[in-house]
């Protein structure tokens, strides 16, 4: 499955999502590896097998095996970190903020792709997963590295579109009203 076939599966109530997916395909504001790694990481974070398969297939001709693994690692490590740090951020008891995480996160320091690509992918996945603490941390790293606000906003916009496609496909599975 590709992005085009995914668009074809979206129901009429998700027309805006279909159009937004089309805009992703034609958007050249990000470098190729940045864009397709971002889309793959977000698709995996959506936890929808059809969406993940579509974006994995789309990314196949645009990513090296190392970049594909890095995108998968971004989705995976943020799956762990977003749960943990969202808890730390939301818990009323301040003691959790002082405790060591004791979570292995070596891939963040050595992702196998340029650090800004990996950080952008982590930021987008964190937006999908709703972890404000991680969003702030990754946005700061990106800003400090000179990544523009427009690029950061584009990454989060792409994340929103990918997530909405996953939700639309799931919503389409609901039985019709009698």
Image: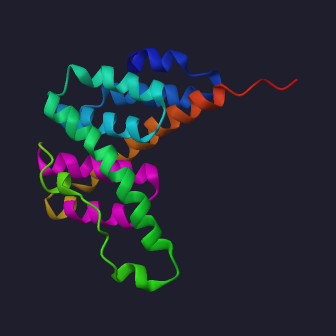
Q: Position of residue 63 (x, y in %)?
A: 18, 28
Residue 147, visible in the rendered structure: no
Magenta stretch: residue 127 in it?
yes
The quadrant of the image that shows the C terminus is: top right
Determine the residue positioned at 37% across, 40% down: 42
Determine the residue positioned at 66% across, 25% down: 173
Q: Residue 51 sits in which quadrant? A: top left
Q: Which region is colored magenta?
A: 113-141
Q: Nearer the viewer, residue 157 or 98?
A: 98
Q: Position of residue 118 (x, y in %)?
A: 21, 48
The quadrant of the image that shows the N terminus is: top left
Q: Nearer the viewer, residue 150 or 63?
A: 63
Q: Position of residue 104 (x, y in %)?
A: 24, 59
Q: Position of residue 80 (x, y in %)?
A: 37, 55
Direction from residue 51 to residue 29 in the image, left or right = left
Residue furthest to the right in view is 178
């Amino acid at each position: 499955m590709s992005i085009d076939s995914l668009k074809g599966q979206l129901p009429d109530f998700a027309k805006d999502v279909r159009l937004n997916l089309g805009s992703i395909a034609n958007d050249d504001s990000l470098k190729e590896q940045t864009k397709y790694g971002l889309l793959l990481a977000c698709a995996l974070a959506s936890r929808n097998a059809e969406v993940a398969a579509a974006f994995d297939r789309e990314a196949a001709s645009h990513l090296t095996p190392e970049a594909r693994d890095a995108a998968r690692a971004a989705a995976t490590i943020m799956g762990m970190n977003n749960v943990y740090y969202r808890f730390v951020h939301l818990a009323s008891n301040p003691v959790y903020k002082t405790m060591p995480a004791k979570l292995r996160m070596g891939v963040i320091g050595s992702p196998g792709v340029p650090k800004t690509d990996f950080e952008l992918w982590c930021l987008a996945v964190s937006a999908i997963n709703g972890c404000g603490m991680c969003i702030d941390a990754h946005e700061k790293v990106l800003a400090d590295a000179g990544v523009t606000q427009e690029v950061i906003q584009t990454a989060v916009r792409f994340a929103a579109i990918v997530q909405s496609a996953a939700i639309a496909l799931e919503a389409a599975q609901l039985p019709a009203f009698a």
